[in-house]
Structure formats: C-alpha cells, structure tokens
Image: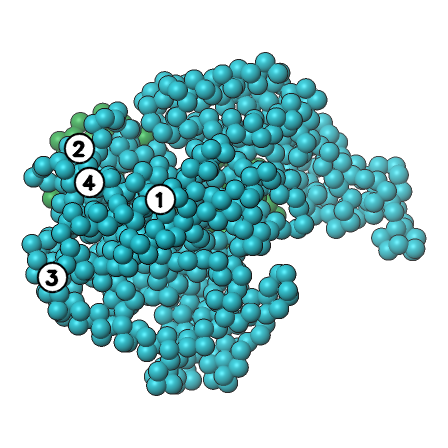
Chain colours: A green, B cyan
Amino acid sequence: MNIKPEVKKGIEAICDSYANEPSPLMMILSAIQKKYGYIPLEVQEVVSEKTGIPVAEIYGVVTFYSFFSLNPKGKYVLGICLGTACYVKNSQQVVDKFSSMLGIEPGQTTEDGLFTIEAIRCIGACALAPAMSINGKVYPKVTPDQVGKIIEEYRKLGAEA
Amino acid sequence: MERITSPETLQKRIDECTSVFQAKIKGEGGKRAVVVCGGTGCIANDSVAIEEELVRLIKEKGLEDRISVNHVGCFGFCSQGPFVKIFPEDTLYRGVKVKDVAEIVEKDLIGGQVCENLLYVDPVTHEKVARQDDITFYKKQIRIALHGCSLINPDKLEESLGYDGFKALKKALTTMTPQEVIDEVLASGIRGRGGGGFPTGRKWQFAANVKADQKYIVCNGDEGDPGAFMDRSILEGNPFEVIEGMMLAGYAFGASEGYFYVRAEYPIAVERLQNAIKDMEAAGLLGDNILGTDFSFRAHLRLGAGAFVCGEETALLNSIEGKRGMPRPRPPFPAIKGLWGKPTCVNNVETLSQIPFIIREGASAFNSIGTEGSKGTKVFALGGKINNVGLVEVPMGTTLRQLIYEIGGGIPGGKKFKAIQTGGPSGGCLTEKDLDTPIDYDTLVARGSMMGSGGAIVMDEDNCAVDVAHFYMSFICDESCGKCSPCRIGTKRLYEMLTLVTEGKGTEQTLKDMEELANVIKAGSLCALGQTAANPILSTMHNFPEEYIAHVTEKKCPAHVCKNLMSYQIIKDKCVGCTLCARNCPVSCISASDVPARPMVPGKPALPGKFAHEIDQSKCIKCGSCMAGCRFGAIVKQ
C-alpha cells in the first residue's frame, strides 16, 4: 500500500511540530493515532525517515500501547469499561450483548466499518457503572437491554453522515 | 492578566482575587452565584447542557448582573450527580436534569425559595438536607488534597489565587531555603499517595543530595488502578494546586523542569491541566525567575497511551522517553539516575496536591491528623456495591466500617457485605472481621492487602471471590509488559488454572499448584506489577477458601456467577406465561411447557392458552436477559 502524498505531508508536519521536544516519539504517535485513526507500517516508515528512529523501535512502541492501532478502527468505537467497579456491576454482560448483536468480538470491527467493540480500561467514571464511552462521549449505567437502542442510534447517525 | 513579577505583585493579586472570591460565595451586594459540577461523571449526565441552560435562562430574565454561573470540579458524591450549588445560601441540588433548570431559576433564583424536590434525602432519617456540609457523606471528611475541588472554577487562575492558591509558593520562595522545604515535608510525615507509601521528604532529600546540571520532577497521573479516580478528580477540580506542589518539589531539590504524565483516558483532566499551565505561563508564575527570584521552572505535559505498567515509576520514565513502557532494574533509583539519566523524583498527583497545604499551614497542621505511621488524610474512591459511590477524603485511621457504612451509606438492596478490595490489582480483599481496623499503610499490609492508590471496591454476596480473582488475573495478563518471565509466563499459567476452576474443571491439586506458582511470581518478578500480581488470588484464597473448594469439589459457584457452574431456571408455579422472557431470549431457548400458567392476578383465572415456560439448558448462553426482564420473580439462578 502506498500512502497518499497529502497524508505523507500531514505526517511529516506532525513530526515537524514536535521537532524541539526531547524524545517526541510518543507525542508524534498519539497525534497520528488521533488524526488518522491508525498507524500502519507505511506511516511508521515516514516517521522513521523524519526522526531517524529505526522502524523496528517505532513498531515496538506502537504494538506496546493499547491506544495505538495497526489497523483502522470503525467509525464508532464502542468502548465498554471493564474496570473493577463496572465489572462487579455486570459490564461483561454488556460486552457480550454488543458482541452477539454485532457478530464481532471485542477488538474487531464490523464489515461495514461502522463499529469497533473495545473492552477498555477504567475510565474513572465508577459512579456511573457500568459505563461506556462512544468516541469519547461517556454513557452512564448501560444495561444489556439498552444495547439494541444504542446500536440503532449510531446506525442512523452513520447513515446521515 | 497583569504579569506577576515579584512577591509583592503576587500578594496584591492574591488579595484582590480573595476579596472577589469571598464576595462571590458570601453573596455581597445581594449577588448570587450558581456553580455546576464539571467533573467527568456529571458531564456524562449532561451537566454541560445544564450550565448552558442556566446561562441562557438567566440572560433571558435579565439577571446576568446579579447572578453568575460557572462550572467547578468534582463534588465527589458522584452517584448523586449532577450537582448545582447556589451561593451564598450553600443550597445543594442533586440529580439535576436540564428540565429542572427552569424551576431552579424561577423558584430559587427569582423566588428565593428552595426547590425541595431536588434536595438530597438522607437514607436513614428520610429528611431532606439543603446544605452540603450537613450531608452525612461530607461530615467526616477533611479536604486537603481535594481543597478547592467543587468550589473554584478550574479554568480560572483568578479563582485559584482567590482560594489559597500560590500562598505556599510565595512563602517558600521568599522565606524558606530549599532544605527548609524538605525538612517541613519530612516533618509532616507525608508518604507517597500513589501506592508505595515511601516518605516523600526522604525521596526529595535523596535527589537534593545528588549534584547534577539538570534534575526533573515528574508527576505520575497514570492512574491505572481500575476503580480509582482521585487523581482524575483532583486534576479536573484544581490543577493549579498540583502544579504548585510540583513547583515546591522543584524548588526543594533543585529541578527546573517538571513533567506531568497523565492517562489519555482522562481528556477533561488533560485539557484543564493544559489550560492551567498556559495561564500560569502568561501570568509569569511559570518560566524564568519566578517572583523575581533565581528560581525558574517549566511544566510539560505528556500523555499515556494505555499501559497499566506505566504507573510503575521507571516504566513511566521510559514512556516519557518515547520507549516501550517497561520497568528498569533498581538501583539505580530514579532519584540518582532517572529521566534521561538525570536525578528525578516521581510523585503521585495526590501527593503533590497535599504539599501546598503542608507548606502553607505548616507540618504540624498535617501530622496532627492521622495515625502513628501514616499522617494526614487519604482520598478513597468508593465504588462497586455501595450506596454512596464517590470520592472521600478522610483522616488516616478511619475504620472500614465508618468508610462503608457511615460515609458510604452501606450496601444497596439490603444485600450482605462480602468484601472490600483495596489496592486494585496489586491489593487484596478485606472482610467482615477487618471492618473495625483503622486503615493506614501499615495495617492494610498486615491484613494482607495494601493502600495502593486508594481504590476501594465493595462486593456483596452476589459477587464470586473466584470470579473476581479471575478478573484481576486477566487484567494483569493483558498488562504484563513481558520483560521478565515470572510475570509474563507465570501470570498466564495462573490465569489458565483459575479459568479451569471457574469452569468446574479444577481439582484440589489445581489450588495447591496455584498457590505455589503465585508465590514464585511474587518472589521472582522485576517490578511491583509482578511482585503483587498474585495478591488478589492469595488474598481471596485466604479469605474465602470454602468458595474455592466448592468450585473444585462440588463444581458449584455459591454466588451463582461462574457461567459453567450455574443455570437459570423458571419456577413454574410463579410463571404467568406472559412470554416476555421467550421474546427477550437472544438464542430462542425458552418455550412453553405443558404446565398451565398461574393466574396473572391472584384469585382470577389464568389467561386462556397460557403455559408456564421452561429453558432449554443445552442452548442457554446464560446471558441473564430472561431474569432481568421477568416482572413476576419467576426466574432464578441456581
């Protein structure tokens, strides 16, 4: 896969913006992940050329942290909190319900590219347990029977966009 | 804002801001102020829209000259949010919805009457409580780390200056030598709030004793312990206090650069911290020659990227350096050789947030609170099966019973208390017999758990001890960095053994093997993550041996949680044949039996053609949808 010239430019610009920081790799990767949604090998090569850090080292960092992804994620990332407070209030059942309704496992993306299910780490919203976060918006006290409604809502939103 | 260039200009700003802030909360000149909670929990419950609606309506009524509106940090009592508070009366409204705003404006802000239906109701006395300080949840609390949280606008430097902000910095820079700052912190007895409990003053002394051209202070905001959210709330509620604590540390041991390392999962905390740093730079409180002295300090922000092990200080330093977040062998300790090889102190958010109080009020104000070995206050995040979920700051030495029953309001639904897990995946659980132990660093360790960062998850009789241990083990397996083999391989094998037990395939030998392996992992791992990884298993095995035995010998899960060892059953005598469960079932395994259903209304005949239902156990996936939907209590777990 070749990356488009404008994407390459965008990535180089991100690298440049951190040129004055000591050890900027994490900041560069966070910015790329946020802007483009994933960091494939081709992009890592661009970062390597710009920063002089070997691709092997960049790949090591990308695969270490759960926020960085080698593959594109769905338009809507359904992050269900599996922190302890949510877990003891049955958030596993919410994960299972999303899985069975969308036919994918946590970490996978639906074929239409609309949804990714993620079992996420504690988001610190323990009073709202079980909590979930969809593209950063936190939903409080999610029960398995709300799952169908949530999926419908975002399908509609996805169709409008 | 006019730049602050000397102790005198700072004092002038403090005086001005204090009188503005005091006038605001005391309602001078007949003015009133409304504050809305802007913590993560309340924002998820629409508090931003509530604030906007307040602003809109107040403007519509032409009251904006007399009534101000702004957001504040976390109130701590998250299960009752969103909160709206009115000054000067100190009226606290809870569970506010956007549609309630009109009533607050009409009845209270214009009519001067309290909106009774939005007040907190005491669960014991059933009386309505109007003032925050009169609510039992707040009565036993002393707010040192949470100073200013839920009171000041975290996006405004002026409000911080108006509420004790930077008084400690001025005192240190103008009247104390760096060594005197360290001595004061040593005398306060404060120990690291992030988990280890190492005396903060000693850490600073180590770094101060090393000669170097550059030193660093790092604030650990990678609050990874699931169920703990005090660092998030402090950063969201009063970021200035934490930066001030960091600057005092920098002054004390000679660091001119500070790094905040904050989890990317906390976007609001990150944004407010960024704003605070920017505003302080603009005001001259960060940068070169602060207050016209020789002390220069810069603060930087780095984000985590989702790795629990980065809460370990050496892994955190590697992560800041743009590497995989793997721990380094110690010694050398970071105080000698840390970030980029320079002497570095890593302090937790909560620790740094308490430093300004110690310097401002003096060590004795701090060490007069607490127990022999643990001074001051500690913030706990109460979560799980407890009525008052939220953040509480209490003196060290408070008992678990006070924490759970007085402040926490007990267990919901009349269920029985089973255990409280402290210290997260590194800690252990405490049971009924430990309830009257005063909690501090040392008593918790003596009881087989640990303080950790202060997460406290309450479990009731519906939680299975083996399942909880299994949950923590899967967490640790995911988060083990893979550097050392006892942790990388050992936790995986331990997880597999626990899986056997939860599936009813384990034997008594499995339990013995687990205990042995757990001790090997403890003894052989490089960092604290591995050394404490087995604690949840050892602690639950110790406290609930009968549950483990039931899983392996009787193949039963006493709490009916482990899916392979339980089933859902329909009690035919109670089933009215409404078919709701059959319609809810995702795998269509519920159908009518040939037993006639019981009447829907007692005394009336049963509906014609209705039969009690039954579950085909061979198809059942045990999702619980049937039981959750049944309105007749006809479905039980066995």
Q: Earlier in the sequence, mark 3 or mark 4?
A: 4
Choose between B358 and B574: the one closer to the eye: B358
Question: From this viewpoint, is residue A81 visible?
Answer: no
- Contact, CB < 8 Å: mark 3 with mark 4? no
Q: Provide the secondary structure element on which disc 1 rests.
A: loop
Choose between A136 and B515: the one closer to the eye: B515
Estimate the spatial distance between the alpha carbons at disc 3 and disc 4, rounded to whole Å: 25 Å
Q: Residue B399: where, in percent of width, then height?
A: 51, 47
Residue placed under numbered mark 1 in the picture: B193
Q: Earlier in the sequence, mark 1 or mark 2?
A: 1
**Residue B336 badge:** 2
Estimate the spatial distance between the alpha carbons at disc 1 and disc 2, rounded to whole Å: 21 Å
**Residue flagged by tag 1: what amino acid is it?**
Arg
Q: Earlier in the sequence, mark 4 or mark 1?
A: 1
**Residue B205 badge:** 4
The answer to whether B134 is drawn above or below residue B209 in the figure is: below
Q: Earlier in the sequence, mark 3 or mark 1?
A: 1
**Residue flagged by tag 4: what amino acid is it?**
Gln
**Residue B291 badge:** 3
Q: Provide the secondary structure element on which disc 4 rests.
A: helix
Q: Earlier in the sequence, mark 2 or mark 3?
A: 3
Label 4 resides on the chain identified as B
Estimate the spatial distance between the alpha carbons at disc 4 and disc 1, rounded to whole Å: 18 Å
Q: Earlier in the sequence, mark 4 or mark 2?
A: 4
